[in-house]
Image (cartoon, grey):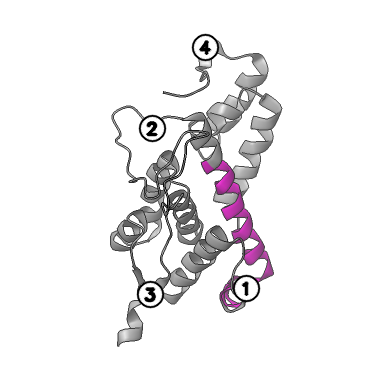
Amino acid sequence: MARIPLFSPDSMTPDQERVYRAVVDGPRGTVVGPLRAALHRPELADRWQRFGEILRYGTSLPAWATELAIVVTARRWNSQLEWHVHAQAAASAGIDEASLEAIRCAGEVRFNDAEQADIYEFARQLQQSGNVDEAVYQRVMNRWGTVGVVELGAVIGYYTLVSMTLNVHDIPLPEGVRAPLELLGAQRGAGAAQAPGEPSLPVLKPAYIAQAEQ
């Protein structure tokens, strides 16, 4: 159950209705996730939905790269709804189910495609350490250019904001959907103590390129 009231179309102010219509008439087709919280401040929700739309649908990156970066972000922050939505999108965009399952379990992730491994590593390193190794950064920039590497960093940053919003307000999964992520590194309420040696968040493992065995 969400910590804050969530809106339905028949309980919105005119400003909220305007933003709501912009979202449902756009590529998303529905209002889910963090926008359900942001609608409490329509000006924020309006800018939010436009920013998110360009980062998900309007970058120079292929859809699989965007969705792969998003699921890494979702897994890092134990963001259930973000994973639910974007794991399906990542699979549709061409990320194989075995790789997605390995990310979901925070296990060893094997890629047959070095480009996918680079996107995963860029997202993983940025989430784990706040920066990216120079070699990975340069490989991404050489493949997708300056614009692409800027967009990728923005996608990861934006979906971190999405994860934080979903988590802190307990925005629910769709009715009947079970939480897909085991809380590796237990999520606790504010002020709860951390057990000695217990990780606060899952530690994602580096990518492994299966072709290197051949």
Q: Is residue 158 magenta?
A: yes
Q: Amino acid at mark 3?
A: Tyr
Q: Which mark is residue 141?
A: 1
The residue positioned 47% from the left and 33% from the top of the image is 189
The answer to whether mark 1 and mark 4 are in CB contact below 8 A is no
Asked if residue 20 can be seen in this view, the reply is: yes
Task: Give the residue number, with chain letter if any, for mark 2.
Answer: 173
Query: Which segment is the magenta one?
Result: 136-163
The answer to whether mark 1 and mark 3 are in CB contact below 8 A is no
Task: Give the residue number, with chain letter if any, for mark 3.
Answer: 208
Q: For the C terminus, which image quadrant?
A: bottom left
Q: Is residue 60 above or below residue 48?
A: below
Disc 3 versus disc 4: nearer the observer: 3
Of pointers 2 and 4, the one earlier in the residue sequence: 4
- Between 157 and 200, the residue placed more toward the observer is 200
Secondary structure of residue under mark 3: strand
User: Residue 140 location, x and y as percent?
Assistant: 57, 72
User: Residue 192 location, x and y as percent?
Assistant: 47, 36
Q: For the N terminus, which image quadrant?
A: top left
